[in-house]
Amino acid sequence: MLTANSLSVISGKQILRGHLLREQDKNNSKQTEFQIYSEYCNNHPNACMELSRLTKVNKYVYFFEACRLLQKMIDISLDGFLLTPVQKICKYPLQLAELLKYTNPQHRDFKDVEAALNAMKNVARLINERKRRLENIDKIAQWQSSIEDWEGEDVLVRSSELIYSGELAKISHPQAKSQQRMFFLFDHQLVCCKKDLLRRDILYYKSRINMDDMEILDVEDGKDKDFNISVKNAFKLHCRDTEEVHIFCAKKPEQKQRWLKAFENERRQVQLDQETGFSITEVQKKQAMLNASKPYYDFLMRQKHPTLPTTLPQQQVFMLAEPKRKPSNFWQNISRLTPFRK
């Protein structure tokens, strides 16, 4: 039997829980507001390039200086002011880490400082991830420019990430004829190419599959009922709307498993982009395709991008430079297969 005292305790716990949930929502909202720094940091190199172009014209030099004097601002060039937001967002995780270090775990502010530090780490990871994705679109544009007989819209119209690639045998209705093809799995689409008979490093565009309409089905070794043929290391792509079915066969079981995992990663990437609101502007897409066919591409790739720290040692001096990551062989393998030609 519930007493008045027990009811008051339950009511108090419910009020406290509601308060904590509201505070959590408030913190998530504030973290979301910091995501604007991601767009700013990624646009910073382009802004500096544009400023460099304008400062070669005297009227713009005089205009910028007049604005600085009218606002009674300190004697710093405009590119210095453009760098300030980047420097600030870099310092937040470091400062919060130091604050947490000297905060007693029993202090009432400890959990709030810890939550703030985790939030800023997430913001840093988001900025670095978006920076990496924006760098990838130039590579994707270069890859597409190397493919012969390209048809239809550019890859960048719908995709911004190469998830996986490899060679598979494709079987489709009604002929049920096996065709050896190279496949490139991007977010939202799977691109199919054919190797040149004489020069195996040259690829020809053949088709693409919209992954948003497809479901992936694992196929057991043996005779397939839909195609009435024996298959091994196979999986199917089934269109929910048109009932169109394609069957793919890998050479080895481990290759099949890598493809199945890649399809999972593709759906996860699409969902994550929707949740975080990641998108590439039409201007960025067009610029990437333009860069792929111009010497300007090499100049753009030499530009330094701001990178934020996601690990926080006690004594750390942050420098604006390219991240020192172990180089990946992924794109090198792609480039050997489809060399970028002028």
Image: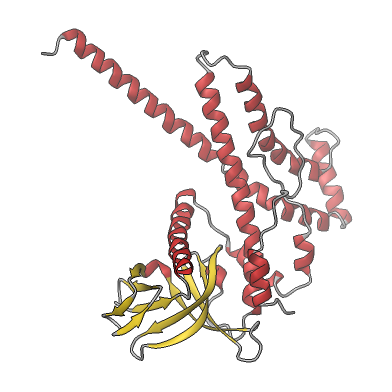
Residue 115 image offset from top left, x and y in percent: 52, 28
In percent of the image, x 47 and y 52: which residue is there? 272
Task: Check the picture and name the quadrant holding the N terminus.
Answer: top left
Q: Quadrant of residue 46?
A: bottom right
Q: Is 267 left, or right, of 15 in this rendering?
A: right
In percent of the image, x 54 and y 83: which residue is there? 151
Residue 50 image offset from top left, x and y in percent: 77, 56
Q: Is 157 left, or right, of 291 in this rendering?
A: left
Q: Which of 135 and 200 is in front in this view?
A: 200
Farthest residue to the top: give it.
Answer: 5
Q: Quadrant of residue 136?
A: bottom right
Q: Is 16 left, or right, of 295 in this rendering?
A: left
Residue 118 image offset from top left, x and y in percent: 54, 33
Task: Check the picture and name the quadrant holding the C terminus.
Answer: bottom right
Q: Nearer the viewer, residue 216 or 156?
A: 216
How many discs mark residues in the rendered view? 0
Q: Can residue 195 be seen in this view?
A: yes
Way the structure is coloured:
secondary structure
Residue 337 in the image: above or below residue 103 = below
Q: Nearer the viewer, residue 196 or 35?
A: 196
Residue 134 image offset from top left, x and y in percent: 63, 58
Residue 330 in the image: above or below residue 323 = below
Q: Quadrant of residue 209?
A: bottom left
Residue 288 in the image: above or below residue 102 = below
In percent of the image, x 57 and y 59: which residue is there? 280
In percent of the image, x 62 and y 85: which residue is there? 148
Farthest residue to the left: give it.
Answer: 1
Q: Is residue 34 visible?
A: no
Q: Is 11 left, or right, of 268 in this rendering?
A: left
